[in-house]
Amino acid sequence: MITYVRLACIALYLAEAGTKDINIKIVPEHVFLDSRDVNISCEFNSNLVKTPQWITIRRNGLFLLHDVVIATGNKTELGEFFRDSKYRSRMEINGSVADQRVNVMMRTMECEDEAHYECVVGGHNDQGSLQMFSDSYALVVNSHPERPTITVNGSSVLNKTFIGVKAGEEVHIECDAYVGKPPITMHWYKYDANNGSYITERNMTGKPSRRLPIGNLCNYFTTFPLGFIASISTPEVRLRCAVGNEQEDVIINVST
């Protein structure tokens, strides 16, 4: 009997310990730029303040700290920074102080939406003292890789284009692509006529470089140059630049 009582007390303690005064949820919490309908909700569950005076969801990200939604009294509205049409057209809000919850539904995603979101609730307790509660959560915005582009000796080429060069000529090839976030590794492959397939190119000189452009913080950009001396012993060189499932081919024809 004593054992059952102890177990019941432990279960009650764990249930109470798991109850939070305030809770912010982001569903889903990891999204892509082409994701739709991301919901950020804030719920207030405390008995310390029976009627909160305000509920606010804040965003701390690329453009610093701003209120996304503010609920006071019977009014729930977007914060001043988000009242521009570019935000209002893709954000829906609901909830109120009386409901003890507010929600922001983002219909589409932008890179700047990646941020820490904080829910803040304030009100007076039975003793008349002001109490504030807060909870925060991070939203991560990722992106998919895009099809690479190839240049040969400084000129852009279309997919599977034949490029003619002379034997002994230095050939400079470069592959450029947005490789997504998190970034996907870029690879060069060379066609092997012996087995009829593309294999990883390891003999040509070149080293990839990757950066996160200032104007596009949700998509890494990779440049991978290759260089070799054209030889008549290899009259045709087929190369492929690939980023995940995105790829581009170029064919080098060597003549005397």
Image (cartoon, rainbow, N blue to C red):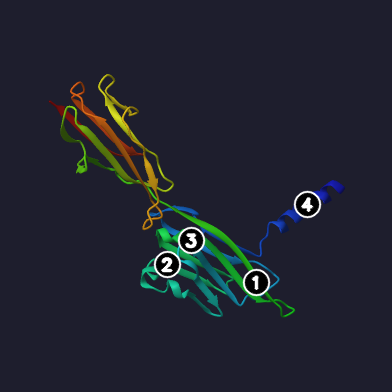
Depth check: 47 or 133 in front? Answer: 133
Q: Is residue 202 above or below residue 220?
A: above
Q: Residue 39 got which mark?
A: 3
Marks 1 and 4, Cα distance to the nearest angstrom? Answer: 29 Å
Q: Is residue 1 in view?
A: no
Which is more N-terminal, label 2 or label 4?
4
Q: Which residue is mark 2?
A: 91
Which is more N-terminal, label 1 or label 2?
2
Comparing marks 2 and 1, which lies closer to the viewer?
1
Which is more N-terminal, label 3 or label 1?
3
Comparing marks 1 and 3, which lies closer to the viewer?
1
Residue 16 location in percent, x, y?
Answer: 72, 59
Q: Is residue 210 left or right of residue 16?
A: left
Comparing marks 1 and 4, which lies closer to the viewer?
1
Which is more N-terminal, label 3 or label 4?
4
Q: Which residue is mark 4?
A: 10
